[in-house]
Image (tube, rainbow, N blue to C red):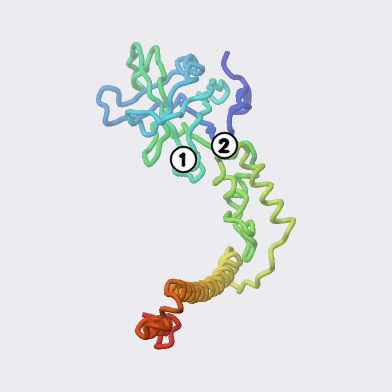
Amino acid sequence: MPNLLTESFEWTKGIDNLPKGRLLKAIAKTTRPTIHPEDTTFPIRLFAEIELMKNARSLIGRPVGLNHAQMPIYGAYAVDADWNELEKQLETLLFVPDEYIRKVAEGKIKNVSIEYTWRDTKQTDAGTEFIGLGITRVDLVEGLDAGDPNAIVSLFEATEKRGVVLAEIIPQKLGEPCMAGTDYVDFADCVAKNQDKADPEAYCGAIKAQTEATPPTKVEVPLGTPPCAPKTAELEATITKMSGTIAELEKSRALAIEDARKSAKQEIIAKVDAAIPKNMMTRNGGAIQLIKSVRKVLRDESGPSK
């Protein structure tokens, strides 16, 4: 039976075991004709409501591609699908890798397109209608115009809560913390960059709550300074502190090397004394003179070591 609900995607059930951050909502096709001037055989293609309705649930498990390349996206597929009778559109949930979730979040991918076969055609004044239509694949469209501009795609969760969408268009106030202490501009930016998490909004909500519970140190921001300047000032202070630490480490390293050199020289002197018996030193003036010379060099009595 077709979906008669008034809201799109209300038919989605049984997906609790899937990571919501990897799902996309897509309107795979509407009854809108598509224009293909490059195709002299089928320049205007018609899609009857009954044909799309028949294909709705057969779309489940079909592969997902990109720009109709020969090979589909590895690991991507249509999780579920149904026909929305009220909106006259074939809706589907797509499971895709994080790379494509990010592209949808960034607005680089906005539409989808279908691949299909048919058993027969019917020529009309309006164009060619496909009979026995069979949809075999759904493709994400990047950098190209979709045949059906109404075939759009969006994040599964971001479209469920209007606050996420609104947050993306509310400008940040001058000097306002950018989720202070984090790498995110605001809550929406955090959600968009963490679609690999099981619940990106809950994840970012915890971060936001923590930053609000412990307000950052106030930094005076001159008029006209970009919103993220406080974070920049903190970063510069951190770099200065790190530079001082590195200088101290270099100084300590130099002292440790000098101490090791002196210790090694003392060890060699002790070994020389132990290797030549004292009675030999008293009988052999040359040996005594040699040992004194060795000691003199090792103790830097003749100048710095080479």
Mark 1 → mark 2, Cα distance in angstroms: 11 Å
Nearest to the observer: residue 78 or residue 254: 254
**Residue 120's mark?**
none
Residue at 53% from the left image edge and 33% from the top image edge: 24
Q: Position of residue 106 (x, y in %)?
A: 49, 46
- Label 2, secondary structure: give it: helix
**Residue 21's mark?**
2
Compared to 160, does 211 lie above or below?
below
Confirm whether residue 283 shows in the render: yes
Quarter of the rendering occupied by the C terminus: bottom left
Q: Which residue is mark 1?
A: 99
In this rendering, position of residue 125 left or right of residue 230: left
In this rendering, position of residue 171 left or right of residue 100: right
Confirm whether residue 225 shows in the render: no
Query: Crowding near pointer 2: few (<14 within 10 Å), some, many (20+)?
Result: many
Nearest to the observer: residue 195 or residue 247: 247
Q: How many marks?
A: 2
Q: Could you say which quadrant of the image residue 73 lies in?
A: top left
Q: Amino acid at mark 2?
A: Gly
Residue at 26% from the left image edge and 31% from the top image edge: 38
In this rendering, position of residue 224 left or right of residue 301: right
Quarter of the rendering occupied by the N terminus: top right
Compared to 199, does 188 lie above or below?
below
Q: Position of residue 31 (x, y in %)?
A: 46, 24
Nearest to the observer: residue 283 or residue 228: 283
Compared to 185, does 137 lie above or below?
above
Q: Could you say which quadrant of the image residue 176 lies in?
A: bottom right
Residue at 43% from the left image edge and 28% from the top image edge: 64
Q: Amino acid at mark 1?
A: Glu
Q: Position of residue 69 (x, y in %)?
A: 33, 31
In this rendering, position of residue 203 left or right of residue 63: right
